[in-house]
Amino acid sequence: MAQRILLLLLLVLLLLPITIVSLISPGAGCLARRRTVTFHRAPPQDDAEHPGRPRPRRDAGSAATGGASRGPTFTPCRLPLTRHEHQVLDENTHETGFNGDDGSSFTLTWVGDGTGVILVLSTISAPIDSFFDGGSSRLYHSMDYGKSFHDISHRINNTFIRKEFGVSPGPGNSLNVILTADTPVVDNPGGIIFTSTDAGVTFKSVRLPFHLAQPITFHFLNPDYLVVISIDGGLWLSLDFGASWTKVYDGVHSFMWGGGTTLFFSYNPTGTVEAGSRGELLLKRTEDLGKTFTTIAEDIFSFGYIGGFLITSVMEELRSPRVIYVSSDQGNTFNRAHLPSASTEQFYSILDGDEDMIFMHVDNPGDTFFGTMYTSDDRGILYSKSLDRHLFGGQRKSDFTNITSLRGVYLTNKLEEDGRIRTVISFDRGGEWSLLDKPQNVECGEDVKNCNLHIHGEHSRYNRVVPMLPLSEPTAIGLVIAHGGAGDSLSSTQHPDVFISSDGGYNWRGSLRGPHRYSILDSGGLIVAVEAQHQGQVNTIKFSTDEGQCWKKYNFTEQPFFFAGLTSEPGTKTMNISVWGYRPEDDGQPMWVAVTIDFKSILTRECDDQDYEEWLAHSTVGGEPETNGCVLGYKETFRRLRRLSLCRNGRDYGVSRRQSPCLCTREDYLCDYGYYRHNNSSECVRQLNTAGQTLEMCLNGEKTEILTSGYRKVPSDKCEGGFAPQPRVETALGPCGGKPSQGPPAGQSSSRAHFDTPREKMVLILVCAGAGVVVLVAIASATLTVRRVLYKNRTPAYRFSNLRVRDEEGGITPDLQSATSSNGTTFHQDSDDELIEYST
């Protein structure tokens, strides 16, 4: 017994300091949707019993009632479903009842691309006070896009799989899958995983030499390369899909893959990561999969890698404000980003980024719930102000949204000085922001001075005002679906409606009354939606073949159930949609239900050339021929489906476009560092606190004088000729006297921890001196804390992890109890209010 208590105490000491970094791997932005989603069962108080399980035949014409709305009225277009259409859909609707399974949550994972394989993990977690019994789970398998499921729990010996680690699919087309068993730490030298290379047809049990502190992370290109942090802070690497493991380093705080096979990780030389030592971490790099290591930065608070940029948040002096350093050469050299520093009360957040530029939010001091948005140059170093009073809610939720269906378009919300929240949109990557136009079929009334559309985002979803975020897909050109309301500002009390844009956000129309879950299928040729009933039950799905102008309703079951969510294969190529929920059985216990509808039976004809049209993006009626459609320096003409064409794009459909350059104008330029765009003007004027047109900064170890006329070309802009401001001139003046680069001398590498600096020695002394206090505190809470860390069966405090990824649900509400990033790392409750959020 004494040995177990000592082991528990050791685990507390090791686990409490760990804060996991959550990042996006290169290439993950190609995934339009998450591959994994979790549905929770939370039955309303007025549950009703619905006996019987067979799915009976139905007559056409049944419809669900819509919810009331207090917003400006509009009339949705509804079309009747013909008897033939109803009959055909009946024949292609498949209902599965998971009899006897009363799991509190269902986690769905799509495996591969176009395989139709879904793995479903049903989990019941044990109460937090039952330390040795974790719970139970079942594993189901579908190979036909969710039309049928088979219980395959026996393939993993009916082992309890951890919900928060769940099912981890390999990247892209890989058929590799990992399941993590719930293995008690006490009396077990390591955890157990199950691996499959055939999308779950067979599994192999693997005993690990360590216990996992987080889900295993795949390399973004090679599904055999795995990396993870253990509960004692060890960084472990496998190059043979988990068959064998090698400890790479000790005392690791966070990690992520860089370009190629480069792996970055931060660590504390003392071997542990104390909360107070976050600004004293070292950043290491291995380019040969753990054979050799190079220390590339120090004084790290957090770091991230995105779009080829390695970004670090640094405390140059102990407990001093943090600053950002950026490397574009995999950490060989760093340059300080010209951004305001962040105190302990502030945070940085990367909203979006690629190889050309970065959107960065810098929080205002205090609990203001807003900050300033900046955009970078193509080196990620010089930043210009893009938007003032950018909203970050009380739960640190940003509404920043990349509209992936049209180049250069972003949506977000800003907090006005009078407290109103208003939606703004940019069509040129943050160069200019404007209010959204009033929806075409909505009138606000005479008492509303400014009638604009305002969109609900992450902040509203977190507060349960809307069930899901705005949705767009790269293959559905111009299509945007979002919850919102028309008026002078965004209202949290207004019952939100669904609005749709077909041209990337320029024009909107009211489409559905009340909140819905929605999904885009067939590359935009089909939209489906289910009303989000908070108390009632659903039996109706709505679908549109004309970009949401008109809708038909299909009654997919005569036994309504409580709606949990929609799910479809990532990438919009499919025409199958699954409606998930639960209904009480005769004994009052809930039964999970999945209804999968194949809409290919309705759209039987493949589209031909006559079904498509040429569409000039960003164009306006009556615009000047030379400049109409010019955004970021060029025009883009797409071949896309005509709105009234009743056919299917199919899986072989690919986006076709033509590009032609435009003459340069002021709109093709951002204001350079120290300049801002004057109100109602495209002219960049100098800020009052800057003297002259020169700027001195340290670049790659050289003190550099920069002469600018106030303009810099928008990264990725392709304009030619036209407006040509005086080019920026950079002159090297000599070596820097400050700290331009954080890297060690050339050739220096390390494979072990060092304590060379006075600060590191002081940290070691302080750690040792404080160990007694930590032990006394840990003894009092050891069992409860370990249980919480291991099973995380608790309500999380939604604070930002230091480098956070924003998931795009693509029509799916994620599991808010265990938010997991696209590369598999978990947002821990003890995350700092820090640095990077990324929209995939």
Image (cartoon, grey):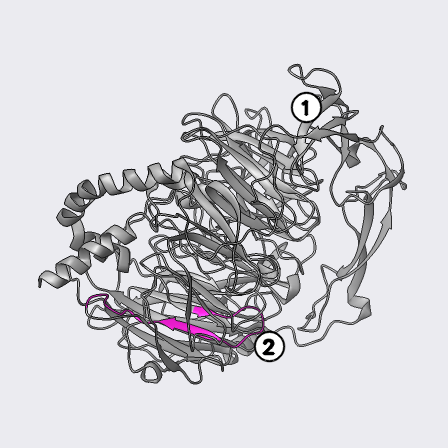
Marks 2 and 1, how far apart at CA: 59 Å
The numbered dot on residue 707 is none
Q: Which residues are magenta?
A: 168-186
Amino acid type at image mark 1: Gly
Q: Is residue 169 found inside the magenta-colored segment of the image?
A: yes
Amino acid under label 2?
Ser
User: Cβ–Cβ below 8 Å for labels 2 and 1?
Assistant: no
Q: Which residue is mark 1?
A: 674
Dot placed on the residue nearer the N-terminal end, 2 or 1: 2
The local crowd at label 1, few if under 14, some if 14 to 19, many if 20 or more residues have their Cα within 10 Å, is many
Position of residue 650 in the picture relative to residue 398 (left or right): right
Q: Is residue 222 magenta?
A: no
Q: Tell which of 797 and 702 is nearer to you.
A: 702
Secondary structure, mark 2, is helix
From the viewer's perspective, is the residue at label 2 or at label 1 nearer? 1
| Element assignment for label 1 | loop
Residue 649 appears in the picture as rendered: yes
Q: Nearer the viewer, residue 765 or 402?
A: 765
Location of residue 601 (image quadrant): bottom right
Q: Report x, y in % for residue 175.
A: 52, 77
Percent across and percent down for residue 249 are 42, 59
Q: Which residue is under mark 2?
A: 601
Q: In the figure, 44 relative to 195: above or below?
A: above
Left or right: 703 in relation to 207: right
23 relative position to 828: left or right: right
Q: Is residue 444 left or right of residue 321?
A: right
Q: Which quadrant would residue 104 be assigned to in this image? A: bottom left
Relative to residue 17, is residue 443 depicted above or below?
above
Q: How many marks?
A: 2
Q: How far from the left and from the top, in percent, is residue 319?
A: 40, 30
